[in-house]
Image: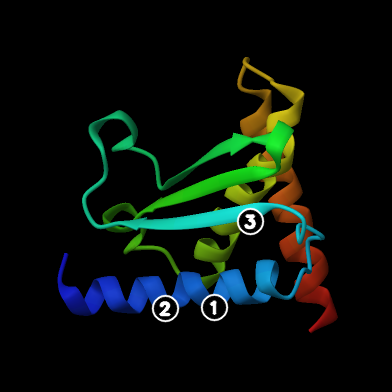
Amino acid sequence: MTDKEVRLLTSKLKLLIKKWIKSDALCLKYWHLSFVFEREPSSEHADANAFCISSWRYQRATIVFNLPNLTSFADDELEHIFLHEVMHVVLAELELDDGKDEHIATTLATMLATIVGKRT
């Protein structure tokens, strides 16, 4: 992955952070959210586009983006991936361990993207 590709993808993700997090569009202003942009994914999560580590008891979460895995996505798909991971921030409290959290995060991300898309 070239430096130019990293800069482009990181800037797109930062625009999504501004749109959804900094604006408090998702009412997460009391959460401490961190975003990490990995140029070389760790082996544990190498196949993931992104993943969320959430400590809901303390309203802290980190979303890690595996940049090489995201290069082929269109902007709307990238936004959906972003929203999916943000949904994990609040779903972590449910402590689902049977894969339902993935389905619920995807469904909620789709709903949000659709609602916002119809407003613009």
Q: Distance of mark 1 from mark 3, alpha carbons?
A: 13 Å
Given residues 68 and 14, the one toward you in this image is 14
Location of residue 1 with respect to 49 vertically, above or below: below
Q: Is residue 118 left or right of residue 32?
A: right
Reading the image, the residue beneath label 1 is: 15
Label ID, residue 11: 2
Residue farthest along the top direction in this orientation? 98
Report x, y in % for residue 48. Answer: 39, 40
Tell me the quarter of the picture where residue 19 sits. Answer: bottom right
Reading the image, the residue beneath label 3 is: 83
Residue occupying image coordinates x 54% and y 78%: 15
Label ID, residue 45: none
Q: Nearer the viewer, mark 1 or mark 3?
A: 1
Location of residue 41 with respect to 12 vertically, above or below: above
Residue farthest along the front direction in this orientation? 58
Q: Is residue 74 left or right of residue 85?
A: left
Residue occupying image coordinates x 76% and y 61%: 29
In the structure shown, which secondary structural element does the residue marked by tag 3 occupy?
helix
Q: Residues within 10 Å of mark 3 (few under 14, many from 20)?
A: many
Q: Distance of mark 2 from mark 3, alpha carbons?
A: 16 Å
Q: Is residue 64 left or right of residue 55?
A: left
Q: Residues within 10 Å of mark 1 (few under 14, many from 20)?
A: some
- Assign the N terminus to one quadrant of the image: bottom left
